[in-house]
Amino acid sequence: MKYSLKSSFARLMLALFVVMFILTVVGRYATLTGASALCVGWPVCMPSAPLGWLQLSHQLLVGIAMLLVLWIFRKAWREQRESSVILPLTTVMTVLFLGQAFIGALRVANPQPHITVLHLLTAFSLWIALAMLTFTSGALIKVDNAPEVFSTRQRFKDFFALSKPLIVVLLLITTYGGLVIGSKAWPAPVLTMWTLLGGALAAGGSSALNQYIDRELDKNMVRTAKRPLADGRLTAAEGLSFGLALCLTSYYVMAGMVNLLAALLSLAGIFYYVFFYSVWLKKATVQNIVIGGGAGAIPPMVGWAAATNNLGLTAWILFAIVFMWTPPHFWALAIVRMKDYEKAGVPMLPVVRGEQETRKQILIYTIALIAVTLLLPLFNLTGMVYLISSIVLGGLLLYAAWRVFTIGGNKPAWMMYKWSSMYLMFIFLAIVIDAVVT
């Protein structure tokens, strides 16, 4: 693979690599000599001694590097949208650079051990990304591509759709439920904002990566054929880059502004959904939804951890509620879309074991779900508002599942699918109201 500097992108990357090297050397020397204390201020300081000019030089180099990073990022998204190497690498490098600046500022204000470790890991990762991108840009880009003209409005809609916003909203409701019950009151607005922002980024990024992995499979299903990647409105590289950017950013938000436990749980949810479910389970076993349901059950634990910085019994019961809710919810959809899943080769329960067995399992899991929801009042973790709500909501859901079991066909299954979505939202709303009232 021959390296060349014929493209402006490769030349810009080489310039950034050199600037970053000088920036690192100057920054390290400024730290060792104590120059930072002789030039205080941001974004530009005023030196109080000759050595303070070293710190000022470091700040100026940071500004130059920032401009180069943003220039390269813009150029990649305009000219390299088909490249499955350049575009994701550029996006990751940009997020790492901004994340390093963000965590570096937090480290000065609040030098917690996990912030220091994250700062070091980010620096290491950033240098790997820089080296890889500097080499690949010269090896893969031989000539400059003409910038493409886009409809900004349409692209915004496509990227928004890529994040599966309705699923994000549902997951944020469960996250907020965990946050409120963990706080035993309305949580602080700042904590709420950062927790929900980090959760939204994690959920949206995971959804984008899921669609990137399933882009060929989605073409074979009526329900998913019009998704941005399956339909070709966005390239695979754009979907991958967007997903990686959101997931990386979510970790910085959670680790920096919430706490380490919430950040690690959120990261675990991303890995669970993207790798364990999307890459392996979905096409490997008829139990894909049952086992894969753990990914969607993590958000309420994130909310609890954000409020308490621990994982108590309540957090595990919240996990179990969403875990048990997932199979009857998605199996109802699988009955309606059985031909789609069969055509796509996805071993969903109705495809492998038939509709009758699926209807039976929906009823069994619904009964188990209702039993799990009653564990909270059983252990005196919630009050009467939740107890009454869970009984009423559980009764309505059981009626819907019973209709699926006894009547059969797509109409009761579709109603079960829609009502189960509302059920999860209402049960967590009951948790929120109970926590603040009780």
Image (cartoon, helix red, strand yellow):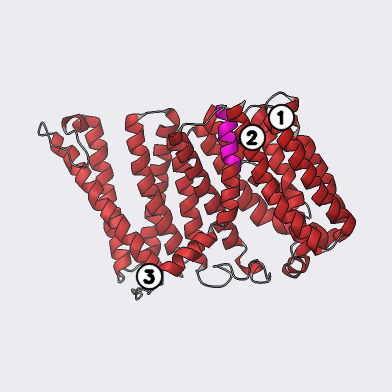
Type of amino acid under label 2: Ile
First in sequence: mark 1 or mark 3? 3
* Label 1: how many Cα within 10 Å (few below 14, some 14–19, many 20+): many
Q: Is residue 181 magenta?
A: yes
Type of amino acid under label 3: Glu
Q: Nearer the viewer, residue 241 or 438?
A: 438
Q: Nearer the viewer, residue 405 or 347?
A: 405
First in sequence: mark 2 or mark 3? 3
> Contact (CB < 8 A) between labels 1 and 2?
yes
Q: Label 1, label 3: how many angstroms apart (C-alpha)?
A: 54 Å
Q: Label 2, label 3: how many angstroms apart (C-alpha)?
A: 49 Å
Q: Residue at position x 42%, y 46% from top?
A: 125
Instruction: Judge from the rendering whether residue 273 lies leftward or rightward of residue 74; answer left or right.
Output: right
Residue with the mark numbered 3: 79
Report x, y in % for residue 65. 27, 52
Q: Which dot, 1 or 3, sits closer to the camera?
A: 1
Q: SS for tag 2?
A: helix
Q: SS for tag 1?
A: helix
Q: Can residue 18 be seen in the rendering of this structure?
A: no
> Contact (CB < 8 A) between labels 2 and 3?
no
Q: Residue at position x 80%, y 63% from top?
A: 410
Of the 4 image quadrants, the one containing the C terminus is top right
Residue with the mark numbered 1: 376
Q: Is residue 187 magenta?
A: no
Instruction: Specify the segment rendered in magenta.
Output: 174-183
The part of the image, by quadrant, that contains residue 257 is top left
Residue with the mark numbered 2: 431
Considering every residue shown, the one lying at the far top of the view is 380
> Contact (CB < 8 A) between labels 1 and 3?
no
Q: Residue at position x 66%, y 50% from top?
A: 276
Q: Label 1, label 2: how many angstroms apart (C-alpha)?
A: 10 Å
